[in-house]
Amino acid sequence: MNAVSKANPLKYYKWGEHCEGWNLVENHNLSVKLETMPAGAEEILHYHQQSQQFFFILKGKAAFEIDSKVVFVQEGQGIHIQPGQKHRIVNRSDETLEFILCSQPSTINDRINIA
């Protein structure tokens, strides 16, 4: 068993509008990711039928749209998203946002985008 990090992830990936991610744990029951979003980036509104998620902000300030409400989460704070809640994360600031995202169970095959 080896330690994982941004420099030594299980997997590196790009997503959304120039966003990056690093898988730190990925199995059916649990997913832990480190992700970054550049200034002005936003995710597509979506929900998960089975997965609950917890976002913890490491750097910056995030705006979360959750069931038509906006919640601001600052560095050092986190937010819990329940299964079925329509949500997305938006970086409305002028700096890069960095956060940990935990999903239980994993969101593999459990994401419904709302166009």
Image (cartoon, grey):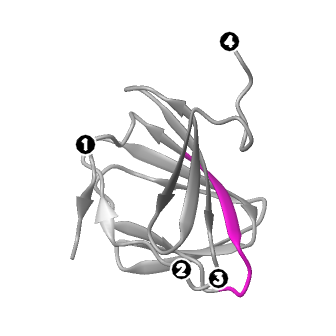
* Residue contact at pointers 3 and 2, CB within 8 angstroms: yes
Q: Name the secondary structure under disc 3.
A: loop
Callout 1 amino acid: Asn
Taking depth in this image into account, of 32 and 64 the one nearest to the observer is 32
* Residue contact at pointers 3 and 4, CB within 8 angstroms: no
Residue 33 location in percent, x, y?
57, 44
Distance of mark 3 from mark 4, alpha carbons? 35 Å
The residue drawn where x is 53% and y is 72% is 18
Distance of mark 4 from mark 2, alpha carbons? 35 Å
Q: Nearer the viewer, mark 1 or mark 4?
A: 4
Callout 4 amino acid: Met
Callout 2 amino acid: Ala
Q: Quadrant of residue 27?
A: top left
Q: Which residue is mark 4?
A: 1
Q: Which residue is mark 2?
A: 41
> How many circles with numbers are drawn on the protein?
4
Residue 90 location in percent, x, y?
52, 77
Question: Magenta segment range?
Answer: 93-101
Disc with the residue nearer the chain's start (1 vs 3) = 3
Q: Name the secondary structure under disc 2.
A: loop
17 lies above or below 28: below
Q: Which residue is mark 3?
A: 39
Neighbours of disc 2 within 10 Å: few (<14), some (14-19), many (20+): some
Q: Which residue is mark 1?
A: 109
Q: Name the secondary structure under disc 1.
A: loop
Callout 3 amino acid: Ala
Numbered tag placed on residue 46 in the rendering: none
